[in-house]
Amino acid sequence: MGNKTRIGRRNFLKNSVLGMIGAGVVSKGAWAKEREGNGTFQETADKTTPKIKDYRILGRTGFKVSDLATGSIQEEGLIAAMLDAGVNYIDTAESYPGHHRMIGNVIKGRDRKSIFITSKMLMEEGDTSKEGLIKRVRKALEDMGTEYIDCMMMHMPEKVEFLKHERFHAAMQELKTEGRVRFVGISNHGSFWFRDPEETMEKVLLAAAEDGRFDVFLMAYNFLQMDQAERVLEVCKEKKIGTSLMKSTPVAKYYILKTRVEQLEKEGKDIHPLYKMGLTRFKDKADRAEQFIQKYDLKNPEEIREAAIRFVLSNPNVNTVCCTLKTYDEMERILRLSGTKLSIKDKAKLAAYEAGCGELYCRHACGVCEPRCPHGVPVNTIMRYNHYFMAQGLEKEAMLKYADIPGAKADVCAECPGHCEAACPYGVPIQGMLILAHDQLSLA
Ligand code: SF4
Ligand code: SF4
């Protein structure tokens, strides 16, 4: 690949999608920055700022959590503004770069007892001896400047057997006794490259519920992907396990891809051949999606996104929904959804979106097509990383994660007849989307 091509693509990204994202970040709506006496900035809201209207009991923890929570938000001011608006559940992780320190800055000077913080630790990385895990938690506490973490989660255990990680449980027990960790939890959103197709998110989480040592679950659940989480949510209710959600708005992809397609076509040059191939394969389904968008007048992605959040808030077994936001305007729109439920109009919008654009969403926690790939490409994982890049603005993290995938990546898809596509029950144009993902995630 020539250097010229790389630069051209980078410029395209910078000037289109990333440029749009960047432009949104500086828009602060009703929010303003004020300088504190100590020289730091604090975000403050004016009187029109929406507030959290609903709090729900987080299972056996007994904590009343806001129905909306902060997810992997990358801007400190946004998290602070969410807390000012009444959000009291913060989701973070050891693997989110710099996030623990950011949370530390945000909670400084606030009533610690009024905030529920969950963090997560990967069991495949770092020191996983009992002492090593204790050390990692102490480091997290230090970075956040807090005496305790409300819930420490096992991050993405892919197999039921991982739940019995006795060193993890021994470390958590010791930290609980010391008062450094109050509860233990688990997060899961499905497949990884070493995945066994039998080890679904549902199977792992139901086993965790049975295990009895996990008090809070963080899982993927949305209107396009209900099957893997609904039974888990019911069991959580029965067993008084707290529930928090992620990946609840699988809607941005269509609009972002559409913008990229239009930009690339407009520029008409300097596009990598893999990208062109991906676009051609993807475009047919995207064009059909466009017909639905026109027919149902679904021009605004925010409408669908808001309906998608109301969908999950309407499930009584859901305690809180983690939101990943990039702008203050976006935050205000999302905060207005607190305490609301799905309307008949929302239902119709979501049904139309699913009919038109559902094929463009690779379901989190799936992986059904992966055994069909002769190269062992981790389809679901790559699609998820691309989602981080495109929909969550986590470009750097997504690219680093992609680079870390051992074995085959999506560059092999260009030379393949696409064995995987017939296996996808949702009709995802896998090959085209993976070629696009590879081109995007492997930017040098
Ligand atoms: S492409 Fe289809 S079958 Fe493959 S992981 Fe995604 S949703 Fe599942
Ligand atoms: S297109 Fe081919 S190489 Fe790519 S994931 Fe599908 S089967 Fe594997």
Image (cartoon, helix red, strand yellow):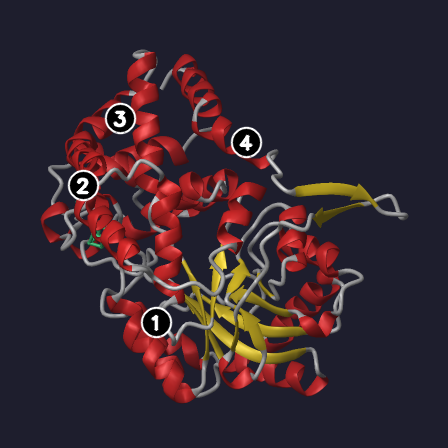
Measured Cα–Cα span from mark 3 to mark 4: 27 Å
Using the rendered view, name the quadrant where residue 171 is placed: bottom right
Q: Nearer the viewer, mark 2 or mark 3?
A: 2
At x 48%, y 42%, the residue is 400
Residue carrying label 2: 429
Q: Nearer the viewer, mark 3 or mark 4?
A: 4
Measured Cα–Cα span from mark 1 to mark 4: 38 Å
The numbered mark at residue 159 is 1
At x 33%, y 76%, the residue is 232
Q: Is residue 168 left or right of residue 10?
A: right
Question: Can residue 438 be seen?
Answer: no
Residue carrying label 3: 274
Q: Name the quarter where the N terminus is drawn.
A: top left
Residue 162: give x, y in percent of width and height: 41, 75
Which callout, 1 or 3, points at the residue further toward the start of the chain? 1
Which callout, 4 or 2, points at the residue further toward the start of the chain? 4
